[in-house]
Each structure stands twice: as structure tokens, then as C-alpha cells.
Image (spheres, rainbow, N blue to C red):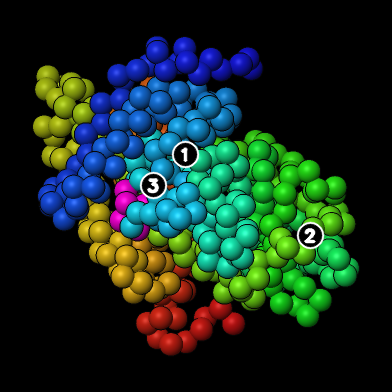
Amino acid sequence: MGTINFEELKDRNFGKDRYVQPDFYNIDELLSEEHILIRNSVRDWVKRELSPVIEEYAQKAEFPHQIIKGLGEIGAFGPQLPAEYGCGGMDYTTYGLIMQELERCDSGIRSTASVQGSLVMYPIYKFGSEEQKHKYLPKLAKGELMGCFGLTEPDHGSNPGGMTTNIKDMGDHYLLNGAKMWISNAPFADIAVVWAKNEEGKVRGIIVERGYEGFTTPETHGKWSLRASATGELVFDNVKVPKENLLPHVEGLKGPLTCLNSARYGISWGAVGAAMDCYDSALQYAKQRNQFGRPIAGFQLQQKKLAEMLTEITKAQLVCWRLGNLMNNGKATPAQISLAKRNNVEIALDIAREARQIHGAMGITGEYSIMRHMMNLESVVTYEGTHDVHLLILGMEITGENAFV
């Protein structure tokens, strides 16, 4: 298909991103000056470095590796983790705003950053030893190392407790066997935080480095979604892992599920970014597109679509803002995070579909971001807990009855 010239693409398409954020309830007034400064800096970076190239990379199903350094420089990797480990030392609202700006451009790019910060760096920070934190976190924060998260297996997605990947204590090392799939960042990751069962059947986390004999990461091809994100498998064939790579401070499913809560929080913000981009594009198009002698923005059915989009975006923005405050104060519950992830991805999908209709036939072309967002969101609605699983999490919180068993 040919090599993509990153710099040439940027030069050719610079300035085409004319996104204006909808803020109908003046939510920016609820943010601090620092929040807005960082958010706007990330937005400027996206418009300059990412928007001009993302469509070409998505069309060719390639990940733009050139952006990794920039993502590290803007603080997109683990911004909510402490500065003492080379991370951003920011609050969860800032983390959410960064994820929102990245997914406003593309869900796959947000996934890359989200996996790095919430599913690789966070478990190392939360459950790792001091040696592990100092060894890995500063390099992960800069993008000098990239990571992935190994939980989902070919036969165990929504039921991670059924995993068969396992570790055996061999005295001076662990022997790791099994396989994981649908793993973002796997094809190029330098390390993988892998969850496996020990001989007692307890789930443990372990850090696996690229280069260990028997560890391979075949890439997943043929995706119609998250095409600008690299996805693959993790295959472990008698992989010898040093004992010091075991995460010492957690056992059981609490470990990976705690990480997923952090990632789901970021998704709840990111999905709103995708929704806002679709809305803004639809609004601009409706004002410019003339039919029957006037802009289609003047027709009742188009105004109905736009009004409903803005209403749902505004509600989702308020959910994110409140959830961010709860996260900052350590009060957010898994069920509250599930509500935000489920609702915000659902409304983003609905808005993408309505925006596609406003764009008419142009909505299926790469000239607009709508179809790419729509396809990406079909993955986002499934990963980190499916739409239905989050419904049951909420149902259990409401009724006290566990519908999973």
C-alpha cells in the first residue's frame, strides 16, 4: 500500500481541523485555569500533529508511531499518577479532559494512551514494588517504553475469572503459558502487564518484557474498527519470567478490575469527545449544505437531530465533570463509573449515526470523521466491559442481586 509520509501529510492537511467545542451549559466555568490550559494545549497538539494524518492512517490500517513521543510530551501517559515517578501528578479531571481531546480525533489513539496510563502504568503504581515503579514508570510516562494489558482470552472475555493463562513457580523464576487476544498496543509493546492464575488458582499480575523466549505478539488484521490502533495477541509458550516481575501487592480479580475502572473512567470522557466532534461536524455541514434553496440547518428535522445531540452531549459532560470530582476525592464507585461508560458510549454511537444522516452521502467518505468515529465506537461499546455487562453491574448495585451467576 506504500509508506505514509507523516510530515508531508501534516503539511498538506494542516488547518483543516476547524473543530469548536460545544459547551451549552458553560461547563468550562466549572474547570480550573489549569484544566483549561492543559485541555487547550492538548487540543492544539491534536489539531497540529494528529488531525492532518489520522484519516490516512485509518484508511491504511496503520498506527502512526511518530506520535508516541508527542503523546508523552503532552502528558497523555499516566497524567493522574504521581510526579515522583516521572508522571504528571495531575487530577482525574485533567486525565479525563486529555482523553476527551484525543478521542475527539480518534478512539484508537485514545485507546493507545488509555491502555498505557490506566492498564499498564496504573497497576505498576498501585500494585508494584518500589523497584518496579522506578524502573518502568518514568520511561512509560515519556513514551520511551510502551505497554499493553493482558486480560482477555480467546474463550474468556466478559468472564475473566475463567482464564486459563497460568504461571508455575519453578524456584528461581515463573513459567508462563497461555494466550491473550484483542490486546491494544500488543504488536509494538515493550512490556505487557499480564494476568494469570498460579497453582492455587489465584489471579496474579506479572510484567513480561519483549524479548523473553517464547513470548510473541502476532498482530490482528482485517479490523473495520480502531484501524489506526495496533491490536494483537499475546502468546506465552513456556516463558521464563523473573520472580521480581510479579506485582507483589495484589491477588485475585480485584487487580485487573481495579485497573479497568480507571480505564473505563477515561473512556467515559473520551466517548464524549467523539460525540462532540460528530455534532460539530454535523452543525457546520448543516449550515453550509443547501437544498431546496436554503441551508438544511433551517429544516425542522435537522434541527431536531442537532438539538437532541446537544442535549445528550450536555448531560454526558455533566456526568463526566461530577464523576471527575468523585474520582479526585476517592469516592467514585465502580457502578458510578459503569453508568458513565455505558451512557456516554451509547449516546456517542447514536450521535455518530444521526450525524452521518445529516451529512448525507458525504458522511460515508473520509472527508469527514463521522464514519470513522462510528466504526471505532463499535469497539468502544464492547471493550472494558460490554454495554450489557455494565447494565448488569448497575442492576446489581440497584437491587443487591447478582445476575451474573
Residue at position x 47%, y 39% in the image: 72
Q: Amino acid at mark 2?
A: Pro
Q: Amino acid at mark 3?
A: Met
The disc, 3 or 2, on the residue closer to the chain's N-terminal end is 3
Q: Which residue is mark 2?
A: 242
Measured from the top left, where is residue 12 in percent x and y? Answer: 40, 12
Measured from the top left, where is residue 242 in percent x and y? Answer: 79, 59
Mark 1 vs 3: CB contact within 8 A: no
Q: Which residue is mark 3?
A: 99
Residue 324 drawn in magenta:
no
Q: Amino acid at mark 1?
A: Gly
Q: Disc 3 on helix, strand or loop?
A: helix
Q: Is residue 400 visible?
A: yes
Q: Disc 1 on helix, strand or loop?
A: helix
Range shown magenta = 92-97
Q: Image quadrant for the C terminus?
A: bottom right
Would you place residue 247 above or below residue 73 in this image?
A: below
